[in-house]
């Protein structure tokens, strides 16, 4: 991230300086304004996140206290254990990652972020190399940036507002593209891990947070076993020995759970637009009712979790400032437009029109910027929502994620500076998602 941040800023400055002295006076002034506006946008964005992060981390605390995350983790244990072999099966990180994936599947990006940060905080307590991403972190964020989504509600709503004849028809192309991106992310994170070693192992004992309770009221927090030549302090060792080994649920229960997840696909195809309005309030009510049934003091637990959300939102402001300023400078300098001109002769023959290229390039950097580009393309009478370009940018927005935003927020929340192979795996997933989106749109809508 150090090198990439420096590259973005220097490239933007060099491009602006060249244009200022040769062909476009005023570019440097625009660059200055963009840098200041980007910093302000970062703070505004973080402030806007305080409320939603407090809300969902409050619900997360209720779920933890009632044992819901452990129940879900045990249902998904056969898959999660293979994806994250370094994380104990009943560790809170497992439940938080599952909830993050579930929120992303339903298009609840605002809900997924607090769950993801909670997962990163739990994974950091298992980290033997503070400041360096673990294999589990890299896998988790690579899958997260792949944009696995079953219901792109925001894109459907925009298409409907702009007069699309079939706003929800992007669901099949989105499912194809996001599935390819997610599979690529998983294989890339697994395959690249061996080429980016974490460094020499050493044991670091971190303070243990208050552990949530499982269905029997026992502490559920675990830490990784120490290396053979290291020892844990007595308090941590005692907590580790007292933690029960929770078995997975029967295979038929896991099968039913996955069948329910798969049933969401035809459900989203049939009633996706109508269902989207029920998701957030339904999630809130379900968590509160679950806590009440489990005899959890829901108000007290909610307030405790909301307090954590406030602190996390403030902590990520410096990381957001760095990324959004760099991206704003790159756009204002004209460097992004130059990349489009340079690459369009290469992308047009493979079915990626030049009009959609800014969207494809900007999507990994800025969610709001990419959304604005998509809105301008869909509202342009020359393209519109039901043209090849309109289908393509809609699919890209619904099936990909803001890679650098996710890495900045999640790694920034736990102070990770050495990200190892995470960025490479995430970018490979982005490329796979773009390629699959192009192929899916041309395959399903050849006459558009």
Image (cartoon, rainbow, N blue to C red):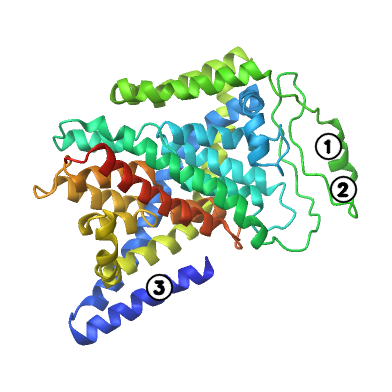
Q: Which residue is mark 1?
A: 240
Q: Which residue is mark 3?
A: 9
For this rendering, which residue is in front, 182 or 200? 182
Q: Position of residue 72 (x, y in %)?
A: 61, 25
> In terms of sequence position, does the residue under pointer 1 or pointer 2 come before the other?
2
Tell me the quarter of the image containing the C terminus.
top left
Question: Residue 380, can we see it?
Answer: yes
Q: Secondary structure at mark 3?
A: helix
Q: Position of residue 25 (x, y in %)?
A: 18, 81
Q: Which residue is mark 2?
A: 232
What residue is at 33 percent from the left and 59 percent from the top?
A: 361
Task: Specify few, some or many for label 1: CA neighbours under 10 Å numbering under 14, 14-19, or 20 or more.
Answer: some
Q: CA distance from mark 1 to mark 2?
A: 10 Å
Q: What is the residue that sits farthest to the left in this orientation?
A: 381
Query: 221 left or right of 377?
Result: right
What residue is at 19 percent from the left and 30 percent from the top?
A: 166
């Amino acid at each position: 991230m150090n090198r990439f941040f420096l590259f973005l800023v220097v490239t933007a400055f060099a491009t602006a300086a060249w244009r200022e002295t040769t062909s476009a006076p005023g570019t440097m002034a625009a660059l200055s304004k963009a840098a200041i506006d980007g910093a302000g946008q970062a703070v505004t964005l973080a402030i806007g996140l305080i409320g939603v992060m407090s809300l969902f981390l409050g619900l997360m605390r209720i779920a933890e206290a009632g044992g819901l995350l452990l129940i879900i983790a045990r249902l998904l244990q056969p898959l999660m254990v293979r994806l994250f072999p370094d994380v104990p099966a009943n560790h809170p990180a497992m439940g938080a990652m599952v909830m993050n994936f579930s929120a992303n599947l339903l298009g609840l990006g605002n809900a997924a972020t607090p769950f993801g940060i909670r997962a990163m905080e739990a994974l950091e307590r298992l980290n033997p190399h503070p400041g360096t991403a673990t294999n589990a972190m890299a896998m988790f964020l690579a899958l997260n940036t792949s944009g696995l989504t079953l219901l792109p509600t925001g894109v459907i709503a925009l298409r409907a507002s702009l007069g699309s004849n079939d706003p929800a028809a992007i669901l099949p192309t989105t499912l194809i593209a996001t599935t390819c991106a997610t599979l690529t992310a998983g294989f890339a994170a697994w395959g690249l891990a061996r080429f980016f070693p974490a460094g020499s192992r050493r044991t670091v004992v971190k303070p243990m947070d208050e552990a949530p309770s499982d269905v029997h009221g026992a502490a559920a927090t675990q830490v990784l076993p120490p290396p053979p030549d290291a020892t844990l302090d007595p308090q941590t060792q005692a907590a580790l020995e007292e933690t029960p080994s929770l078995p997975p649920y029967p295979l038929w229960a896991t099968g039913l759970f996955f069948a329910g997840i798969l049933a969401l696909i035809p459900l989203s195809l049939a009633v996706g637009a109508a269902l989207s309005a029920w998701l957030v309030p339904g999630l809130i009510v379900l968590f509160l009712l679950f806590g009440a049934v489990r005899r959890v003091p829901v108000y007290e637990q909610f307030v405790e979790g909301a307090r954590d959300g406030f602190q996390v939102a403030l902590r990520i402001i410096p990381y957001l400032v760095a990324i959004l300023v760099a991206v704003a400078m790159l756009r204002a300098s004209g460097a992004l437009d130059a990349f489009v001109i340079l690459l369009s002769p290469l992308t047009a023959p493979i079915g990626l029109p030049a009009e959609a290229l800014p969207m494809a390039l900007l999507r990994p950097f800025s969610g709001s910027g990419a959304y604005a580009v998509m809105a301008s393309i869909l509202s342009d009478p020359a393209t519109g929502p039901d043209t090849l370009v309109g289908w393509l940018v809609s699919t890209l927005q619904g099936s990909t994620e803001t890679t650098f935003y996710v890495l900045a927020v999640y790694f920034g929340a736990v102070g990770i500076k050495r990200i190892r192979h995470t960025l490479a795996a995430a970018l490979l997933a982005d490329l796979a998602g773009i390629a699959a989106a192009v192929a899916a749109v041309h395959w399903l809508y050849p006459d558009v």
